Amino acid sequence: MAIKENVERDVQKEEAREPLMRVVENKMDGEDRSSRGDQWMVYLSTFVAVCGSFEFGSCVGYSSPTQSAIREDLSLTLAEFSVFGSILTFGAMIGAITIGPITDFLGRKGALRVSCAFCVVGWLAIYFSKGVLSLDIGRLASGYGMGAFSYVVPVFVAEIAPKHLRGRLTAVNQLMICVGGSMSFIFGVVVSWRDLALIGIVPCAVTILGLFFIPESPRWLAKTGHQKDFEVALQKLRGKDADISHEAAEIQDYIATLERLPKAKLLDFFQKRYLRSIIIAVGLMVCQQLGGINGVCFYTSNIFKQAGFSPSVGTISFAILQVVVTGIGASVMDKAGRKPLILISASGLVLGCHLTAISFFLKVHDLAHKASPILAVTGILVYIGSFAIGMGAVPWVIMSEIFPINIKGQAGSLATLVNWFVAWLCSYTFNYLMSWSSYGTFILYAAINALAIVFVVSMVPETKGKTLEQIQGAIN
């Protein structure tokens, strides 16, 4: 009798539990639908934004194929053309400093429009140039737009993407930079430098037109109090049949928590609750640039020439490998995770630097004449392939994820400014270092990339599969 009563009681418990389990299952299904609904608007919005990344690459790649023609047509000295090439970086620094507050004030779409406007003005100034002044003004303006794009594109994409796609879509930013640079080089071989400037306007035109058809960042709308627009934008991005209630509630709860905090000022970045985010972002930007990438990229042809390898074959191989491997890295980021990719990348950078250093060591000491060029091209290709798989894209992805929205504009500008400054420092010192010691230069870069591994292991969290609110709550 007792056994029968126990059985009946267990049955009743199971019957009572079933409705609760259905509620839990429905909630989980709803959360899954909210993040995996119809994604076409997310893809369209990402495409519109990363046209700015393509523009970034076009700006960087413009000076290489046009140097001889511009100097001949406008009678520029080598020093004058050097100013034209390098002033792009100074424009990018100004863009990095100012675009954060603009992004917070005008919204992510507004900042993209501002970036496009500067690039269009810059390209037109270059196209109509009759002398060095207008040429430099155009280059400075396009540099500003490029620096602005380098911040606002990954931030916008990170804020609109569902968590299971965020890493992959944000990494497309780096892929499009590589493609833009490669296309600029290819077009520069077959068209005049003025026509190439006009071609540079095309990505901006696509972005400006596309912005009319995509929603603003829901997180920015929530932060600025546009409640109705926030819900409409989130619904568009997740699909009309998706249940956005859970994601919307999480975003609003996080925004409400941040609103109770005082508005962040520059000195607030060094408060304990924000300090780890700042250290991670700035540290990754320093690791990305100080490991030698700009020196290697800007002087690839000369490196191959010094090592005794064909500059044209080496440069073409370099460009193709960079695009292909960046695409692979973008496609696997949400599966492999951010931290494993960047650790593999940094380890490959150390190996590539050592191989290149050995090549130059053999050449300097007149040893292994046949092996030296092979080691050089192998080392450089290992280096650029390793950079493209992780160190190129991952720091920008993590930077777009770790800052709370109340300091994202100012903190993102700081990180981007550091990136551009260190990029300039690396490119400026590269030739001096190579004059000092060709193999010593790459040993130095290997040591810096080894330190980057230590920094990533000890400081950088894994952000794969987490919402922005979860990431920022855990760090800050």
Image: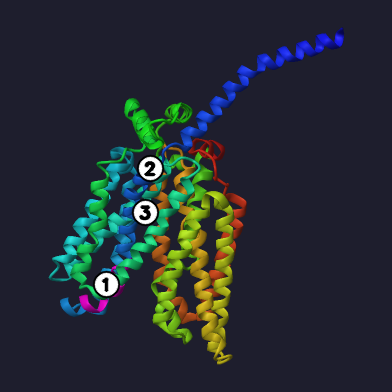
Cα separation between marks 1 and 3: 23 Å
Q: Nearer the viewer, residue 326 or 262?
A: 326
Mark 2 or 3: in front is: 2
Horizontal side of 206 relative to 268 (left or right) equals left
Of marks 2 and 3, which one's residue comes earlier in the chain? 2
How far across and down, in percent of the image, does residue 141 sit? 24, 58
> Under tag 2, what secondary structure?
helix
Q: Which residue is mark 2?
A: 40
Q: Quadrant of the N terminus?
A: top right
| Label 1 vs label 3, nearer the camera | 1
Residue 223, can we see it? no
Label placed on residue 315: none
Left or right: 111, with 395 as reference point: left
The magenta span reads 61-70
What is the quadrant of residue 354 in the picture? bottom right
Q: Is residue 215 magenta?
A: no
Residue type beneath disc 3: Ser
The residue drawn where x is 33% and y is 65% is 60
Residue assigned mark 3:
150
Callout 2: 10 Å neighbours few (<14), some, many (20+)? few
Identity, as a three-letter code, of the amino acid under mark 1: Gly
Task: Give the CA separation, mark 2 to mark 3.
Answer: 24 Å
Please say if 49 is above or below 247: below
